[in-house]
Amino acid sequence: MHSSAIFLIEFGAIILGLGLLGRFAGRFQFSPIPLYLLAGLAFGEGGLLSLGTSEEFVAIGAEIGVILLLLMLGLEYTASDLVSNLKTQYPAGLVDATLNALPGAAMALLLGWGPVAAVVLAGVTWISSSGVIAKVLGDLGRLGNRETPVILSILVLEDLSMAVYLPIITALLAGTGLAAGSATLAIALGVAGLVLFLAVRYGRHISRFVSSDDPEKLLLVVLGLTLLVAGIAQQLQVSAAVGAFLVGIALSGEVAEGAHNLLAPLRDLFAAVFFVFFGLHTDPSSIPPVLLPALVLAVVTALTKIATGYWAAKRAGVSEKGRWRAGGTLVARGEFSIVIAGLAVTAGIEPSLGPLATAYVLILVILGPLTARWTEPIASWLQARFGKAAPVAAAASEVPAPRPAEDQDSVDQA
């Protein structure tokens, strides 16, 4: 009875603390992710106070948090959307992967961490934070801008690539041989392809089967189905996260919208627990030795993300100002970088990888909203300062019927 009371006190304090941190972040309009990570650092290994009774439950909650993050991500897209993005935007996805994954892999090799850690760190530096970027676009009033579809297409391709990348990471971290790893990847790709096929052909039937007018029943069916598929996927050594992502893709229409509304609070709760859990298993004293590599990596990959967004927006015919805004918006890293690093930390691949990923995400999740706001003004100022006033004329010439709102590239897509 005593341990039960201690558990309730500890877990209640965690949830209350996260709520207060979230309110604090919301008041100043920035992502709460760095605060959640810092909270985990404060109460984990080497922190101010360590948790005891509630740590096991927090670990389970963290795993559910990853599953819900990927499920909600899948609910955002239909299978036809994913197929369409693959066909039209794959060059931007390839440029994005090349420019942003290579610096992470190179840093891991320079630090002597080996090829497996290099593949993991490549993923950490490659994937932008969909959640942070979506919030920034809304806060800055850029949802109607011409560059926004380009940004969203890159994020969709990154998210879709997780269905291939995560099984590879899972196989590598499990230490399986080439044959077993290839079999795992083949199973993952086969399942992903089958789900996409079924979702395109029979998505309405699947959604009708899951659908319910009663919110309680819809919540239970969707959540139960997701956990069941995630567990089966993990048993097959694919990835629970990939299983959840595919369930989200398979649902569409009113079912997807209803499930999204019902599951959003659960996702926010368990995702916050996940970030705390990651921080709990990172010793604060291990961060200073990797702070310099993390800072170098953050600067390099911020520049490569800006270059990615600029190139992709230019390819789409967006004006000069919009290109810079697209690049600056993509800089933020967050939830999925931590998910990838968390897999490696759990597998015990490289002790310093977790602290470096934590420092890296903390830097870029704070820097990201700033680059989204200031990259274009700074670029315009530098170009004007060095006598290159062409971007203003180029912006006017690239947009067909200039008007006052054109300054912000808020062109009606209709």
Image (cartoon, rainbow, N blue to C red):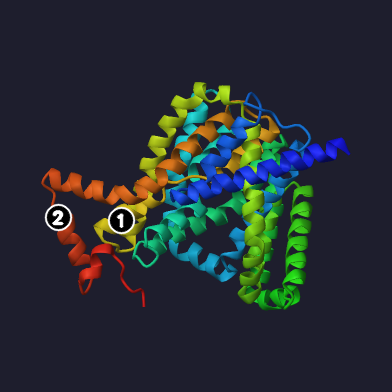
Q: Could you tell me residue 2's position as x and y percent?
A: 86, 36
Q: Which numbered tag is attached to residue 390?
A: 2
Q: Residue at x 25, y 57 (%)?
A: 320
Is 237 in front, or is 61?
A: 61
Specify the quadrant that holds the N terminus.
top right
Measure the alpha-carbon separation of dots 1 and 2.
14 Å
Q: Residue at x 62, y 27 (%)?
A: 350
Residue position marked by numbered label 1 in the rendering: 323
Q: Could you tell me residue 106's position as x and y percent?
A: 47, 31
Earlier-in-chain disc, 1 versus 2: 1
> In terms of secondary structure, where does tag 1 sit?
helix
Q: Could you tell me residue 71's position as x and y percent?
A: 65, 59
Q: Is residue 379 left or right of residue 232?
A: left
Q: Could you tell me residue 111's position as x and y percent?
A: 51, 24
Residue furthest to the right in view is 1
The type of residue carrying mark 1 is Arg
| 403 w.r.t. 370: above or below | below
> In terms of secondary structure, where does tag 2 sit?
helix
The type of residue carrying mark 2 is Ala
Residue furthest to the left in view is 387
Q: Residue at x 66, y 62 (%)?
A: 263
Q: Is residue 128 left or right of residue 262?
A: left
Res. 313 in view: yes
Q: Are marks 1 and 2 in contact (CB under 8 Å)?
A: no
